[in-house]
Amino acid sequence: MTKVTVVQMRADTEKEKNLKKILGYIVQAAKRNSTLCTFPEFMMFYTPSRQSASELASLAEKITGEFVTSISEAARKNSVQVVGTFYEKSPKENRVYDTSFLTDRNGKIVSKYRKIHLYDALGFKESAKLYPGSSVARPIKTSVGKIGMMICYDLRFPEMSRMLASSGSEILVAPSAWVQGKMKEEHWIAINKTRAIENGCYVIAPDQVGNIYCGRSMIVDPFGKVLLDMKKREGVGIADISLDQVKQVRKKLPLLKNRRTDIYNDFRI
């Protein structure tokens, strides 16, 4: 069994305040013997609707900037793997990438993923401030298991999680900032459970809480059992995961093997 930490946090509008909290959460995760510490989307800072695209872009950093570098150093000092997120500078003027990254326990960044599905739905238009990534990050082998990286709205697109699972992912990590609204918590819970069940993998989904976000950070096992639901509590939540569970479920319910990819195809109209 491996201990995994999920951080549910309410991000402040000030980057420095959030970074201080983040570094403290990494220490907490290490003290509780977690191998992996995961953070929500937009942990760098909360972006209120009044903040302009140019103001957001001015605050974004490169992955070599102080924000990510400080987190990588904390990962090294505490010998814990970290999945975090940040606003990354992009080549498009007044647009930023919504980027997640994974460090190993030595603080080395071993994977980076730029969100490809922007939340232009239900009254929101992320593309007004964000720039989409152009590729899915390959699953990365870690001491916890093979991890597939997703971000928030990506969860609504089953093609992506299936691609990651069929490519070897045993764990899907989806940092999120799930916006409150009618049926939104119901969608969040159902989607996280479904992505786990249909792929026979763990889903680790740290979420923002407070501001406009619903919380309910979750860890779901490969058979759809909710191992952790943080409700509206800010702080850390810990659950034990086991790759043996992934192997057992995929053997008993071989959904990946039973696919008929020789038949599936879009109809030509």
Image: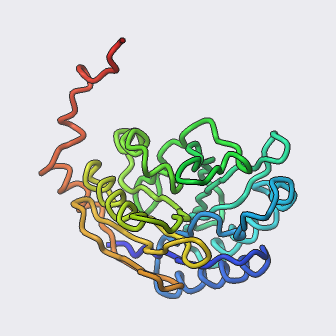
Across and down, in percent, residue 239 comes to 36, 77
Please identify the quarter of the rendering in which residue 24 is found. Answer: bottom right
Quadrant in which the C terminus appears: top left
Q: Eyeballing the image, is 150 above or below 260? A: below
Q: Quadrant of the N terminus?
A: bottom left
Q: Quadrant of residue 204?
A: bottom left
Estimate the x, y position of residue 154 in percent, counting from the top left: 49, 49
Query: Residue, x 72% and y 66% (percent of image)?
Result: 47
Residue depicted at 56% across the width and 70% down the height = 39
Compared with residue 77, is residue 151 higher up or lower down, i.e. above or below? above
User: Viewer-proximal residue, 136 or 92?
Assistant: 92
Relative horizontal placement of residue 230, taking residue 196 as reference (left or right): right
The residue closer to the viewer here, 127 or 79, is: 127
Task: Give the residue at x 59% y 63%.
Answer: 41
Q: Does residue 190 lie above or below 7 as drawn?
A: above
Name the outermost residue toward the top.
Answer: 269
Quarter assignment of residue 77:
bottom right
